[in-house]
Image (cartoon, grey):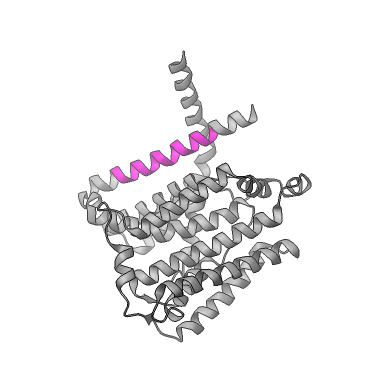
Amino acid sequence: MATRYKSKAVSGATLLRLALLIALVVIFALWNPAFISGRNLYALMQSFALLGMVALGLSLTMIAGEFDLSVGSMVAVGGLLTLVAGGDSLVSGMGVALVFAVLVGGVNAIVISRFNVSSLVVTVGSMMALSGFAFWLAGGKVISTDDFDLGFALDDPVLVVFSARSLITLAAFALVGILMHYTLMGRDIRVAGSKRQVAAASGARVGRSLLIVFVLSAVAAALAGSMLAMSLASAAATTGGNLMLQAVSAAIVGGVALSGGSGTPAHVLLGSLILTVMNNGMSLIGMGATGILFANGLVLMGIVLLDGQLGAWMSERLTMLRAGHSA
């Protein structure tokens, strides 16, 4: 019965987020018809490619009951390593950035699990170390490249509104969704976030789960930074300065609990799209950065306050409709 009720609640939460996303699209389209133009939707998906990738990786650590505060700095390092270490081959530079991210994520996970240190403390240290490394790599300037080919390939429109970069982000959501829903590792990650001691006692691979989520979080951030650097043909140490807060907001709006154990990649996808649509739409109608941040905060608080009650109400309505159709 508990499992059945949880499934219904998830359905209600999904409907709530879908309704909010559709309402935002309709409101902005009516306010300014340019919102639904191909050019603007393409720009919206380009923004989603960055935020969604970082939010996806970060959400995995949150589902496992931990937190990775270093993702913003990793975005900057990923972009800089791609250009600095790439030399004549940006693909090689991306490879260096991703290997570096695996090492950083692995070190974070080992320190957290082996020495039982709070992930907040560990990743604050990683964030500061990575930020210092980024400034050292940049040498106080913006790093640029004359190789525009990969950037053009990543940003060329696909079906008007997509690009290779946004499609890679969508593919990442699909792959992580398969991991979380159809593998034992996905189950272990979720159980580790909800009942850590019980999970360890029952044989769940808690240490391995933490290793995987922190490596994936670091790799996702580095990949996002690397693709952004290729797209812009430049990188700076200040890139991703407030991206961590946006990624956290996207995960929470998507229903990932700070206490761990709940949340799905599909919901994080919806949360990322909601924030991206909000930011894009409000910018299009002339709202400044301060107003956009204020609105993001209101939506975040509203989702948290209404999620349980409104989601449960929508679940009950959905159950009644299903019962009526089956009758």
Task: Count the numbered circles shown.
Answer: 0
Q: Residue at x 46, y 51 (%)?
A: 173
The one nearer the camera, 24 or 67, is: 67
Question: Can you say whether 265 is above or below 123 in the image?
Answer: above
Which SS type dominates the magenta stretch?
Answer: helix
Please give left or right for residue 182 compared with residue 325 in the image. right
Report x, y in % for residue 250.
Answer: 47, 53
Report x, y in % for residue 43.
Answer: 29, 59
Report x, y in % for residue 169.
Answer: 42, 56
| Residue found at the very far bottom of the displayed protein | 139
Please give left or right for residue 1 compared with residue 55 in the image. right
Q: Give the image quarter of residue 213.
A: bottom right
In magenta, the rendered stretch is: 9-26
Q: Residue at x 45, y 83 (%)?
A: 138
Q: Residue at x 36, y 80 (%)?
A: 144
Screen quadrant of the N terminus: top right
